[in-house]
Image (cartoon, rainbow, N blue to C red):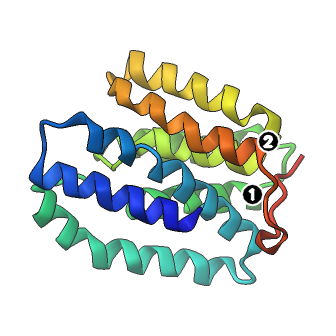
Amino acid sequence: MQWIAILTMLIDHFGIVWFPDSPVFRIVGRMAFPIYTFYVSVGMVRTANKKKYLARLGILALLSQIPFSLLFETRTINVIGTFFVSVAAVYAMERIPKHLPFRYLLPAAAALGMEWIPFDYGAYGLALLLVYRYAPRHLWLILHSVLNVFYTVFLLGSSLQWFSLIPTAVLAHAAVPSWTGYSAPR
């Protein structure tokens, strides 16, 4: 799956730069983000040191920001920055006892911040990470669909985002390899 994510992302970026009017490249590219998001959620579960995992994401986000901004002529924070902020918010939330309802304000504040300061995928990215991290696998496709409805209707997102459901369907119904060590908290 990781190779599929890399390949589909490269096809998407190739299309953005050289064929910006062709939706085919963008459709293929919609496959990458859910796969990367899934693997970030796996990384959150598998890491032995959460601080180092977060630091690596932060360093990678910083190193990739300038090339991203120059290549795509944007001031948007790249998707790795989205993962960094999302993981930080979830880790911070997880440190607060479950019986305290204000713990959910941390991801909510991060989601709002990622929409205010434009992040690639923004609140959508954080929400999908939360789906993979906490929802039972049999609900992933439904919750991702609800997220796409919200994204398309309220955030005026592209209808091409519906193609992102394909990898979620595969991930939700395929056996997750044992090497991932992944099992969503129940």
On residue 158, the disc is none
Looking at this view, is 134 or 28 the one in front?
28
Residue 129, horizontal then vertical, whole percent:
60, 49
The residue located at (32%, 27%) in the rendering is 158
The part of the image, by quadrant, that contains residue 131 is top right
The part of the image, by quadrant, that contains residue 52 is bottom right
Marks 1 and 2, how far apart at CA: 20 Å
Tally of numbered discs: 2
Residue 177, horizontal then vertical, whole percent:
79, 65
Residue 13, horizontal then vertical, whole percent:
25, 56
Q: Do the residues labelled 1 and 2 touch (CB within 8 Å)?
A: no
For label 2, count other residues whose C-alpha is less than 10 Å away and answer few (under 14), some (14-19) or many (20+): many
User: Which residue is denoted by mark 1 in the rendering?
Assistant: 94
Q: Is residue 31 visible?
A: yes
Numbered disc in front, either 1 or 2: 2
On residue 137, the disc is 2
Looking at this view, is 37 or 168 the one in front?
168
Q: In the rendered view, tell whether residue 39 sits above or below residue 27.
A: below
